[in-house]
Each structure stands twice: as C-alpha cells, then as structure tokens.
C-alpha cells in the first residue's frame, strides 16, 4: 500500500473512535498523557493469528507494526509476536514498565503504564488474555483491538477485563472460521466498548493475492478481513489516536 493511499484512508471515517479520553473519566484509563509519557514509553504489542510468523510482512498485523515504528521512532515501543508467545510479551511489558530497574513494579510504575494490544484470530484472543493477566497484577491497558477474534481453549475473548479502558472488535460472520461477533465489558463503568464492527465480503470479495493459496481457499472470509486495508487503516487510526504527538 502506497503512503498516499494509506494516509488518505486514515483521514476518512472512524472519527467517532477518536473521542477524547475525558468523557471516560471513570474508566480504567491510567494517568494523564503528559505524566505517563515522561516516565515510560507507550507499549504497543500485536499478535499474529494462526501459525503466522511475526516477520511475515504480507500479513496486516505485521504491516501495522512496521508503520507505527516508522511514524513513531521514539517514545513508543512497538512489537509484533506469534500468538503463542504471550508470556514473552508479558515479560517484555514488565521490563519496560520497570523504569527504575529494581526488578519490581511500584504502584506508580503500574499507574503510569500505557499499553495497547491488538491482534487477528488467535492473536486477537491472545491480546485479551494478556490484558487479563496484566489486570491481575494491577496494570492498566489503554486499548485492545480484536480482528476476527478466535479464542483458544481456556481463553475468553468475549469479556473485556476491567483494567482495559477501551476495546474495539472487528469481525466477519462467514465461512468455517469466523470471528467473535460481540465483545462486552466485565465492568461497563470502567471499560468503554468502542464498537463491534461487522464486515461482509460476499458481495465485495477481496483477492488477497499475496496470501497463501490454502488460506484463500479454506479460510476465505477469515483471510479477507485480515487483508482488508479499510479494516487495518481503522485499527491503525485507533492506535495512533492514543499515541503521543511526534515532534517534527
């Protein structure tokens, strides 16, 4: 996707998702933007779906991470991982939040956390599972974004834990493998569900010509939402709206 097209897509739609945090004063959102950015980087972690490798650039989850690294060279830590490496992501988050390097997170270090988690398929479910783990440790999460979320055994990708300030869900309803249709907040007073956004590719299919043939054949619609540039432009806009301004 060219920079011009990507920029144009970002500039349209989804304005409703960029509502200032002030309207959610009682949510799980951490301390003010200025305070948090002075103490720790914003942490953005994405998870790929299925058995996809973290550096497979054909996949949109990986492309989003690459765009963010380019647009935010400082102040933001961006990483994309395989969905089975949730514990690695957890350990990395704890390391980054430990700004004084004493091996233990203080109340202030936890309070200053600014974490965004996103993913596709098993990766989307993994993002929610990681958010839940962080919640048990008293660590807040700014935003989770699920794209055609498919839960692994033992995971609950439907209920968003109360430590998450905002959550969005993108899904398509067709095919053998399709995503979670609706997510809800464990505590609506603390978590704002931005929306459950439905996409349907029966009338307007997407070729996904760079994806493996077996994905296009057996997981057609599940693959189409992963390669749909409109979906991922919205995901990227959601994430960027929660990131610090970059000084030119």
Image (cartoon, rainbow, N blue to C red):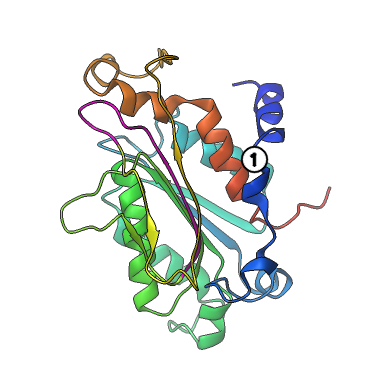
In the depicted structure, whether residue 221 falls above or below residue 164 = above
In the depicted structure, whether residue 175 falls above or below residue 146 = above
Would residue 10 appear left or right of 146 to someone viewing this image?
Answer: right
In the depicted structure, whether residue 78 falls above or below residue 40 = above
The residue drawn where x is 45% and y is 66% is 93
Residue 176 falls in image quadrant: top left
Residue 226, image x and y in percent? 41, 30
The residue drawn where x is 32% and y is 53% is 126
In the depicted structure, whether residue 173 falls above or below residue 17 = above
Quadrant of the image containing the N terminus: top right
The residue drawn where x is 75% and y is 54% is 245
Would residue 222 appear left or right of 243 to someone viewing this image?
Answer: left
State the residue in front, 70 or 237: 237
The residue drawn where x is 41% and y is 17% is 208
- The furthest residue to the right: 248
Asked if one can make out residue 97 in the rendered structure from this viewpoint, the answer is yes
Name the residue that disc number 1 marks.
70
Residue 37 falls in image quadrant: bottom right
Asked if one can make out residue 82 in the rendered structure from this viewpoint, the answer is no
Query: Is 176 inside the magenta-drawn segment?
Result: yes
Question: Which segment did they paint magenta?
Answer: 164-178
User: Is disc 1 placed on a helix, strand or loop?
Assistant: helix
Residue 71, image x and y in percent? 68, 42
């Amino acid at each position: 996707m060219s920079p011009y097209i990507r920029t144009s897509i970002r500039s349209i739609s989804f304005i409703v998702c960029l509502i200032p945090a002030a309207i959610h004063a009682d949510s799980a959102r951490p301390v003010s933007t200025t305070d948090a950015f002075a103490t720790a980087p914003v942490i953005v972690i994405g998870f790929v779906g299925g058995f996809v490798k973290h550096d497979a650039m054909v996949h949109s989850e990986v492309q989003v991470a690459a765009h963010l690294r380019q647009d935010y060279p400082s102040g933001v830590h961006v990483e994309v991982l395989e969905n089975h490496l949730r514990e690695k992501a957890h350990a990395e988050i704890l390391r980054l939040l430990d700004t004084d390097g004493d091996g233990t997170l203080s109340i202030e270090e936890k309070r200053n956390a600014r974490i965004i988690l996103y993913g596709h398929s098993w990766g989307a479910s993994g993002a929610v599972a990681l958010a839940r783990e962080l919640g048990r440790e008293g660590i807040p999460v700014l935003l989770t974004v699920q794209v055609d979320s498919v839960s692994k055994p033992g995971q609950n990708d439907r209920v968003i834990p109360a430590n998450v300030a905002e959550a969005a869900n993108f899904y398509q309803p067709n095919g053998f493998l399709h995503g979670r249709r609706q997510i809800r907040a464990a505590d609506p007073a603390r978590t704002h569900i931005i929306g459950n956004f439905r996409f349907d590719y029966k009338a307007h299919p997407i070729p996904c010509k760079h994806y493996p043939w077996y994905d296009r054949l057996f997981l057609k619609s599940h693959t189409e939402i992963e390669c749909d540039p409109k979906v991922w432009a919205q995901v990227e806009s959601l994430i960027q709206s929660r990131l610090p301004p970059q000084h030119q």
